[in-house]
Amino acid sequence: MPLRIHFTMEDLARTRIADGPAPCIELSTAARQLQERTHPVRLGAWRHRTLSALRPASRMVFALMPRRGRITDFLSGTDSTSGTSGTGGATPADLIEQIRATPRSRLRASLEHTARHQPLPPWAHRLPDDPLLLRQLCDSLEHVADHALIPHWQEIQAMTAADATVRARQMLGGGVETLLARLNPRRVRWRAPVLEIAILSGLDADVHLTGQGLLLQPSVFAVEAPILNLDALPQPVLAYPVAPLQDTTAAPLFAPLPAAAAAAGGGGGGRTATAPDAVASVLGHTRAAVLTAIARHPGCSTRQLAALLGIAKASASEHATTLRAAGLIDTRRERQTAAHVVTPTGIALLNAPRARP
């Protein structure tokens, strides 16, 4: 039986879409995916590269972010909403700094709460009273994030932004109920006024939002099942896989970036550094401008792309088709509208260092 979330008119009015990834959700679900063997096509290469680079101390992270069961909640940051505010600006580095500053009282309460539901390793109980041990755990978290998330953060941001664009169009076209009905048809079903969610635990329960509404959080790594955090403030959070990951056709995620591009563009979600002259010499000026515009406006439609560049829609569509065929952009279609996003290869090209005279 599914989990049933009951909506009132106030809940529907206050339901919104996050406009960027939540670092705490991406880090915890990435840690879980590293311990899985599922999705070998989409995640196999990423999983192999990441695990090959991790130090043995990373086992501390996996002990508190296990493949199944609860994730100790102080790892979500300074409070239950850290990284899930929907502002799109938080990074994995911000999250880890918040975890480093966790008060002892919250550490202790969080660990005691987890221990009531599942066993913890003996060392975990010493975290509130052992600053050196906490530092080792945070260093291990940072190490995992450095290899699993940060090199791909721009792509994660682009994928969630593109998904948010698709969802916003669904809401504009049919209201919140249409948005909920199309959120994740395999796992989520809208039976007005109830949202039925099939979660991994198989929990059979009724939840009333009591006017808080719901924050809908697109996620790249939460591909197994929706994740629901009812304790988040100011409103509960429902994480779901971004739209492209719900397609039946699997494609590998996170192709390895060239070293120069990874160094230039992997630092925690900063703005893409472009080299327009170098890119134009390869693609031509108009096509380079199209690629740059998509990088700066992930999820833009073909019509928006044409308006940004002051070119005809047919020309924007033609250039986008060429860039997609070259593997530099990807396009998610929602009915008659396309949402364009730059691929890792496109990011690598934009971040390529300029040749010196």
Image (cartoon, rainbow, N blue to C red):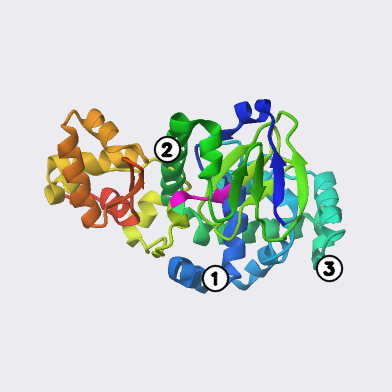
Instruction: Report which residue position mark 3 lands on.
Output: 122
Please state which amino acid type lies under the numbered disc 2: Thr
Indicate the quadrant where residue 271 lies. top left
Q: Earlier in the sequence, mark 1 or mark 3?
A: 1
Q: Magenta-highlighted stretch: main secondary structure?
A: strand
| Image point (69%, 65%), residue name | 66
Could you say where residue 219 lies in the image, as x and y percent from the top left? 53, 50
The span picked out in magenta is 239-243
Examine the rendered structure and indicate whether residue 109 appears above or below residue 214: below
Any magenta on residue 241?
Answer: yes
**Residue 16 seen from this side:** yes
SS class, disc 2: helix
Instruction: Report which residue position mark 1 lands on.
Output: 38
**Residue 277 seen from this side:** no
| Image point (66%, 36%), residue name | 193
| Mark in the foreground, 3 or 2 | 2
Any magenta on residue 257?
Answer: no
Could you say where residue 273 lies in the image, as x and y percent from the top left? 32, 43
Left or right: residue 49 versus residue 349 is right
Q: Earlier in the sequence, mark 2 or mark 1?
A: 1
Instruction: Report which residue position mark 2 lands on.
Output: 165
Please state which amino acid type lies under the numbered disc 1: Thr
Could you say where residue 243 lies in the image, as x and y percent from the top left? 46, 50
